[in-house]
Image (cartoon, grey):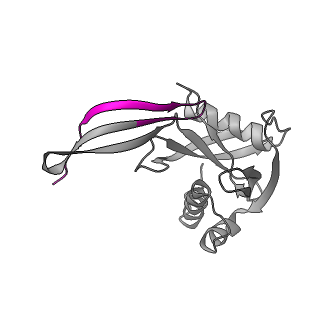
Amino acid sequence: MIFEEKTLTSEMIYEGTILNLRRDKVSVKGGKTSHREIVEHNGGVVIIALTDDGKVPMVTQYRKAAGRAVLEIPAGKLEEGEDPAKAALRELKEETGYTAAKIKKLTAAYSSIGYSTEVLHFYLATELTPGATDFDENEAIDVSEYPAGELHRMAMDGKLEDGKTIVAALMLSELVRSGQLEGI
């Protein structure tokens, strides 16, 4: 039987520009209490784009949490109340220079459901037109393209380390394998 935890008290520990951290006291099974630390985040968008010649634009950027540069697909955070599809198109243009004539939502998923409210909205972008990037002033990004067929192998071989990129690569692989890219 599922036991729904009820919040008894909630304390904001930290309020930042990207996330907030709160500590909730909750009721748990057996009439006891426990604490949950929750990261509040507006969510983000993840864009797997596919060029007409079957390549996927990817970005490499330094990630402080990893302590090194990491290969990823384009992504970005949502502003309060922002439409995810519009944010996906914006982030694709900013990070890769591409604009997309077609965009399709693939799924939405919690990034780490055990402690974060962040939901990532995954999109497939097609019918791309190249253009100039428009990086944020504090971003230093290298853009490269990989054949779509290589991403599945890269994910399975551990060459992709970013969770959202792995999910998107495997989703694209399944779309290609099952023929579902037709008409997208």
Magenta segment: does it hold 183? no
Which residue corresponds to the image point at 40% horizontal and 43% vertical from the top-left? 37
Give the percent coordinates (x, y) of residue 40.
47, 36
Give the percent coordinates (x, y) of residue 27.
21, 41
Which residue corresponds to the image point at 66% horizontal and 64% vertical from the top-left? 160
- Relative to residue 103, is residue 10 drawn left or right? left
Give the percent coordinates (x, y) of residue 126.
68, 47
Which residue corresponds to the image point at 76% horizontal and 51% vertical from the top-left? 61
Where, by quadrant of the figure, is residue 78 drawn? top right
Which residue corresponds to the image point at 42% horizontal and 49% vertical from the top-left? 113
- Relative to residue 136, is residue 113 drawn left or right? left
Where, by quadrant of the figure, is residue 25 drawn? top left
* 49, 41: nearer the viewer: 41
Residue 51 in view (yes/no):
no
| Vertical arrangement, residue 123 with respect to residue 174, above or below | above
* 147, 17: nearer the viewer: 17
> Outermost residue toward the bottom?
157
Q: Which residues are magenta?
A: 1-22
Q: Quadrant of the N terminus?
A: bottom left
> Outermost residue toward the right?
132
